[in-house]
Amino acid sequence: MREQEPVIKVRHLKKYFMANRHILKPSDYVKAVDDVSLEIYPGETVGLVGESGCGKSTLARSIIRIYEPTAGEVIYKGADITHLSNAKLRQYRNKMQMIFQDPYASLNPRYTVGEIIGEPMEIYRMYDKAGREAKVQELLELVGLKPDHISRYPHEFSGGQRQRIGIARTLALDPDFIICDEPISALDVSIQAQIINLLEKLQDERKLTYLFIAHDLTMVKHISHKIGVMYLGHLVEFGDADEVYSNPLHPYTRALLSAAPIADPKKARESKRIKLEGEVPSPIHAPEGCPFCTRCAECRPECRITPPIMANQDGHKVACFKYV
Amino acid sequence: MALLEIKNLSVDFKTRNGVVHAVRDVSYQIDTGQMLGIVGESGSGKSVGMLALMGLLAKNGSVVSGQMLFDGRDISPLAEEFHGDMKAYEKAMEEIRGVKIGMIFQDPMTYLNPVLKIGTQITEGIIKHDKCSKQEAKTRAIELMKQVGIPSPEDRFDQYPFEFSGGMRQRIVIAIALACRPRLIIADEPTTALDVTVQAQIIDLLKELAKEKNMAVIMITHDLGVVSMMCERVNIMYAGKIVETGSLDEIFYETKHPYTKGLLDSVGTHAGTGRQSLLSIPGTPPDLLKLHSGCAFMPRCREAMNICRDYQPAEVCFGADHCASCWHFCKDRADEIVKAQEG
């Protein structure tokens, strides 16, 4: 896999939002994503985990330029798309699609399923009307819905079915890179597994590449080949999923994994939880050095001065002074 | 005697499209100091049962049958004590709701009043029910805030909800629930809106407090992970019925009902790592308006038989209190059960 060119290469990406805009005082910035670099290879799923506000959605949205990155580069299959104009970006947009969290909010209630799924193709002037309809029906079948659902409205479907409609729309333009932003967290437990299975099936059939954002650590473990852990806008650990889960290096990753509820009473009784004191600091007044230093049990003096850089431990990267 | 005993509770909602039987003939009990988990998907009736207990059902909902014995006293609106007098019932509930039974809700931001200081919100119940002075109530509120782990409570007493993080807000909600020293806490998805590290903190806090104050806790959740972290007993609900009940280990390791099995499979408890596909439950949760006469899980069940479509299975117990309602365990009594349902 290594010889292949990455589908997405992110280099030193930053996204700052202005907060407390003031004429006389200098503005504060929320450093939502701060100096993140990662590579995503064809056909793999990269899982992104972290607590709310850690910047995982902002990173994903900056990659496909829903947000304009403040600094850094995003390279799609060798082409730098960071500074392209909207018109030029158009030829890449169809290749990079997104599945959203809330299937109740992401589908227009006044459009029929056919219109929802067909709209992207209309915008990209693909096929004629009959061709589009045939394609919509093919997509519906692919995601496990019936072709005659085409003329129904979103309110007639359950949450899981709506998420399937969202997935069909995402696939309409034959993308190769899909961002899944918490696609299962609004669904019932029994439905979550159905959607995960569907996403995996589609990935195998269509050689899709996923960036999968979630806060449910068990499901991420199941679907991902690689895992990235984010904390306060920084990517603190990145590596093969099995490796990160079985041998977490960063103190934050260890605490996060140990806090995840295990649906198995015996294991839950045995597991030793690492308790984290306090809360995530405000991203406006982030700590000077390592973002985690305020809550880390192994914090050293140097941690408070400069942030650690990602160090490579046999393909398993971690940003922590312990490993430098 | 059990602290709370629910007997044959049924709750209906009248809607424009017909009557929804949200809770159907549910019975269970909980002892002092016990932790009970009620697990189910949306629409399974897990929250509605609790709202009925607290007398908080929406206007179109009503308890149609059953008893709810709290400490031996029936507190259902149908209880003989009230003779159908809703005013008497409301008055009695005021002495119970928030005093003897506390509630913790899912989303602390919508539960707390955004325009009142949190101090006011914690002391409100204390002043009303314990008839003490504002100053006394404040002292107790600050003590409570300390117990639930809010740093510098004296300063934070006068702050508003928006000045707190999600985890801190949930701690305040817990402080309010504890304010009148209840004997039973009903926690309705208390950690669903929180991050995993905060969730772990809140679960620890609830466990510690329950132990310290010898309170019973009913934890309503869809998360089997949360259940295995904190509960002793578990009720699994589907379409308004308890389909399986047992101790934590019985539910996880001696699973009987196909729905419980399906739930455990779909969270990957019994699956290893790697990408073999998860065993999911096919189909979607049922529309409660269109239930057929048999077992509600039948359309999604991998082990369904013909009899499941038309007749309700009887509850069968395996050991002291591990019971499940499934035709696979009462096949041999089929004639008798069918006759009872037809008669």
Image (spheres, grey):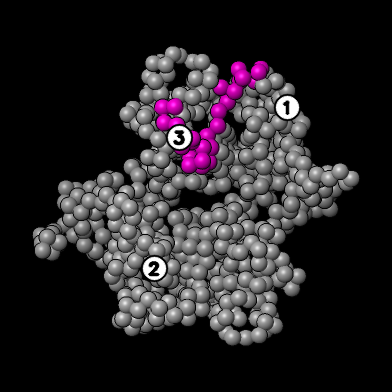
Of all chains, the one bearing label 3 is A
Q: CA distance from mark 1 to mark 3?
A: 38 Å
Q: Amino acid at mark 1?
A: Glu
Q: Secondary structure at mark 2?
A: helix
Q: Earlier in the sequence, mark 1 or mark 3?
A: 1
Does residue B328 appear in this view?
no
The disc labelled 3 sits on which kind of residue?
Answer: Arg
In percent of width and height, residue B277 lies at 41, 38
Q: Chain of mark 1?
A: A
Task: Count how many numbered circles sit on residues in the image.
Answer: 3
Q: Residue furthest right?
A: A24
Q: Are marks 2 and 3 in contact (CB under 8 Å)?
A: no
Which of discs 2 and 3 lies nearer the camera? The answer is: 3
Viewer-nearest residue: A219 or B29: B29
Q: Quadrant of residue A73?
A: top right
Q: Is residue A294 above or below residue A150?
A: below
Residue B89: horizontal and vertical position, in percent? 39, 78
**Distance between mark 1 and mark 2 Cα atoms:** 56 Å
Establish whether labels 1 and 3 are both on one chain.
Answer: yes
Magenta range: A87-115
Image: B188 above or below B43: below
Question: Circle 2 is placed at which residue position?
Answer: B52
Q: Is residue B55 magenta?
A: no
Question: If the image is split into quadrants, where does the C terminus of chain B sit?
Answer: bottom left
Write down the residue under mark 3.
Answer: A110
